[in-house]
Amino acid sequence: MTLRAAVQMDPMDNINIGGDSSFALILKALERGYELYHYDVRGLTWEAGRLTTKAHRILEAKREAGAHYKFGDEVLIDLGRDVDVVLMRQDPPFDLGYLTGTWLLERLAGETLVVNDPVSVRNAPEKVFVLDFPEFMPPTMVTRSLDAVKDFQTRHGAVVIKPLHGNGGKAVFRIEADGANLGALVELFGQVWPEPFMVQQFLPSVSKGDKRIVLVDGEVAGAINRKPGEGEFRSNLAVGGFAEAAELTPREKEICDVLGPQLRERGLVFVGIDVIGGEWLTEINVTSPTGIVAIDRFNNSDTAGMIWDAIKRRIGCAPRAFPRHDRLHSQSDSELGLCGDIHPHVPRKRLSADPVRGDHGTWRHRGRQGPFRFLDARCGRGRGHDRGQLDLVRGRPLDRL
């Protein structure tokens, strides 16, 4: 069976075809013969338990400016029945529109895999999730208080102030040890953004590089070292930084060893972390990570292929609450060698489509809600299934097996 994927992303017209990670994933999918659809998050429509959207089949994609893609006719697709996976790849801002997209995509649990998992994306903004790992972070504060920032700056000298939900190095400011303009900048942040902002000690080692490390299903896929351009302290490629080949330091390996299992368990398949000076973790990027094109260029690797392979492993193990739509899926799961509707820990049999997963710890069935016993299972090594966490297995009532 051909893998069918829907890519939720920004319009194709304005993407950077030379370095965009979403475009690299599209190229690899088409190379493998997958069936791809492109849609805008603003087109999501929920009614009567079904999540649909108008989408375009991606017929061609190539790195040719002005002719880099070709769409088919617009079609209406059911994201729970017509595709195997949804890639959530639109760029921030991480605003209510973005959050609403995660709430809607969460309805697909048990039917269609979403990468990255929308619940985990919502609960793990780049500069908030990283707070779970203070042992790897530079001195950091999240606040709206000018007095708190002044005290922090007095103790740590030069600081960097940035929006809590910014991206691409935008609106990141450096304040020197004398604190000049600190009050005015804090006032500006308070007027522009309703949420707190992040303050970190400035790390001179940023001149040595800000390393982007990509993890695929919890495993290191590769890294690049990004250095600031002339007259800049920001190393983001989007603001003039440049990339070079990189190897991981022992400290960076330790960071990845700690983060990997948690990312895998949360369903965060494609993640980019940022480490300054080989030792300081500053961000965990889960919304729309980038960097795989540069990594593959330096390492002669195939990170996009690794991501699709990880997706296929998860699809192969995840039970589905509903059988695949007959008009799009003619082969049975047994013919494909996939788990499909079959739970990996019981003899093969067709599961009832009645139970629909609700929040963890509850079940929903014909409008009623109540407690139930739930599985929390992992694929077994000896069963020929993926070793990763079966996030979609959670929520299957044991009494229904």
Image (tube, rainbow, N blue to C red):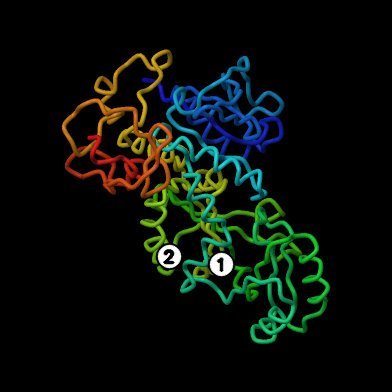
Instruction: Name the quarter where the N terminus is drawn.
Output: top left
Residue 324 lies, in percent from the top left, at 38, 22
- Give coordinates of residue 294: x percent, y percent: 56, 46
Which residue is denoted by mark 2 in the rendering?
Answer: 255
Dot 2 surroundings within 10 Å: few (below 14), some, or many (20 or more)? some
Question: What residue sits 70% from the left and 30% below the top?
Answer: 13
Residue at the image position 65 percent from the left and 86 percent from the top: 155
Looking at the image, the residue that sits furthest to the bottom is: 155
Quadrant of residue 347 in the image? top left
Residue 261 left/right relative to 149:
left
Between the C-alphas of marks 2 and 1, the distance is 12 Å
Please give left or right for residue 74 compared with residue 170 in the image. Answer: left
Q: Is residue 351 above or below residue 396?
A: above
Question: Which residue was labeled with disc 1?
Answer: 276
Between 151 and 51, the residue placed more toward the observer is 51
* Quadrant containing the C terminus in the rendered view: top left
Comparing 384 with 164, the one in front is: 164
Mark 2 belongs to which amino acid?
Ile
Q: Nearer the viewer, residue 64 or 23?
A: 23
| Residue 314 position in % (x across, y down) | 35, 38
Would you say 214 lies left or right of 72 here?
Answer: left
Rendered view: 373 above or below 316: below
Between discs 2 and 1, the one toward the N terminus: 2
Dividing the picture into quadrants, the one containing residue 366 is top left
In the image, what residue occupies the spot 63% across and 38% down?
A: 18
The vertical placement of 87 against 31, above or below, is below
Residue 90 drawn at (x, y percent): 61, 40
Judge whether 321 appears above or below 207 on screen. Answer: above
Most extreme residue toward the front is 368
Kindly identify the amino acid type of the residue bearing the numbered disc 1.
Ile
